[in-house]
Image: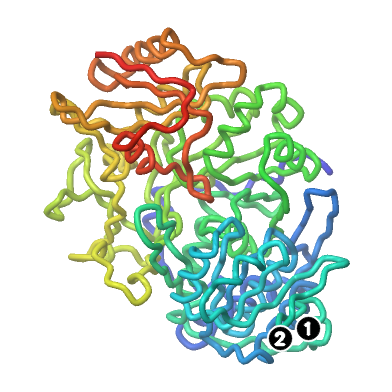
Amino acid sequence: MSNTHPAVAAIEDYADVLARFRREDLEALFDGNFATGINVCIECCDRHVAGGGTALDWESQDGRTASFSFAEMKDYAARVANLLVAQGVKPGDVVAGMLPRTPELLALILGTWRAGAVYQPLFTAFGPKAIEHRVKMSAAKLVVTDLANRAKLADVADCPTVAIVLRPGETAPLGDLDFHAEIAAQSTEFAPVLRKGTDLFLMMSTSGTTGLPKGVPVPINALPAFYSYIRDAVDLRAGDIFWNIADPGWAYGLYYAVTGPLLHGHATTFYDGPFTAESTYGLIKRRGITNLAGAPTAYRLLIAAGPEAAAPVKGQLRVVSSAGEPLNPEVIRWFAEHLAAPIHDHYGQTELGMVVNNHHRLRHTVHPGSAGLAMPGFRVAVLDEHSNELPPNVPGVLSVDLKRSPLMWFSGYWQQETPAIEGGYYRTGDTVELEPDGSISFVGRADDVITSSGYRIGPFDVESALIEHAAVIEAAVIGKPDPERTEIVKAYVVLAKDVTPSEALAEELRQYVKKRLSAHAYPREIEFLEQLPKTPSGKLQRFILRKRDTEPAGTTQGSSSAA
């Protein structure tokens, strides 16, 4: 496969695109009408059949591969839709999928949309309680899974009908449907059910790191925002070979590894295997990937493998996009030096999709450590505790101006109050600063900001300084209660392979950060860990580290503190 980059797409000035933005212009790019009738399977599949292109390139961890054209996926989705209707699924009902990244997963998603139903992702690493909460919340009518995950449904109260994707030699449990056998008996004819823009097509959930997950209903009206992000921030071009590493069990994967590229008639890539530096570099090389998207957690693991592992694909990646947590400047520098690829930070939430980006396609200044500028179609503001908009360089809560954000689609949690929406703004809960040029610099979650001796310290800056040290692979910074200073900065550090933790190294790291930041914004206490606590989607869970400091210490490699 050629590594030649695709022809240059039209790069435009951010200010020009912003000035002429109209939601109607985006809606005109779709076949359906958001007011009178639209079907997501048509938009993501049927309308691209005539072009003869590929919808999915799939590779398994044991070396199997397959490609599916849009025509093949259309027929597959029709069979799924017929199966759903046969099982009593009606337009607006929820169908849940708990599958790895396989062709069956994509067919299930598209078939659910074709039937006018709502798809709910269940991440394969979820345990029974997490699954039960989500299935009960959505009132799902059918769950499609595989034998490896079937046992998790055994204790789910009032579990809906289960369909099993079986591998050769496997048998479906008594009472379950054999997915492949049922699909084979269905017709490839199924007229897509038209819905309105206000109708749902996804039922998501928040990560639930600090409480029970909340349901996030996603209406079809979100499609223009997903389309715009893939075009302007990811800069997906016709000649690109695209891979979004994120699992479709989570928002970034489902929004932008499935929905976004398919809306553009562009093939997506599924790799059904665990993430390792070796597997990732191998797939990039084999598939000729030119446009890559994922999370900083994955990128730091690539860095940990060293420049030698990156060398075979250096210069192959045209653009790289990062989302899920702030992108440390050291990662940006490393990718430029060892992969010859620009990596840009993007910001969003399950409730919003992506809303603040360093856009690959739109020309604007990119500041390392900054999340970028609001995506055209959104207006963001930084608010104080009284909902006043703050001027540049004053920390506050990143918020979306609902009156001037025509691409905003989230209107509230599923069957729950939404205190984040008030006074014409949606508050993200993330603490940021507005820069004079309109870009947004991340400080931390509101409850992550550290108050020490009267200073407010953002953990992101300290973490970024730490990982610039050659011995450090990952770092997480929290505020530890302190009777004299209110809080002290404490860092949890994961070291590079073959680096031994010691008091001397801890002191070296303290001084390293102190020189780069300030006399007050350095970690007075450092604890070395083998790994940091994260959600299944790879987001850092600082609340677990904060809790760690109020309970007996767990097993660590060592810790050190300074007065």
Instruction: Please give the label number shown on residue 83.
Output: 2
Front residue of 305/495: it is: 495
The kind of residue tagged 1 is Glu
Specify the farthest residue to the front. Answer: 552
Image position, residue 338 (x, y; %): 64, 24
Side of 248 where 207 appears, left or right: left
Residue at 31%, 73% (x, y): give it.
Answer: 416
Looking at the rendered image, the quarter that the N terminus falls into is top right
Front residue of 263/471: it is: 471
Residue at 57%, 45% (x, y): give it.
Answer: 294
Residue 399 lies in quadrant = bottom left
Side of 300 where 217 appears, left or right: left
Looking at the rendered image, the quarter that the C terminus falls into is top left
Proximity of marks 1 and 2: CB atoms separated by less than 8 Å: yes
The kind of residue tagged 2 is Leu
Residue 326 lies in quadrant = top left
Q: Which residue is mark 1?
A: 182
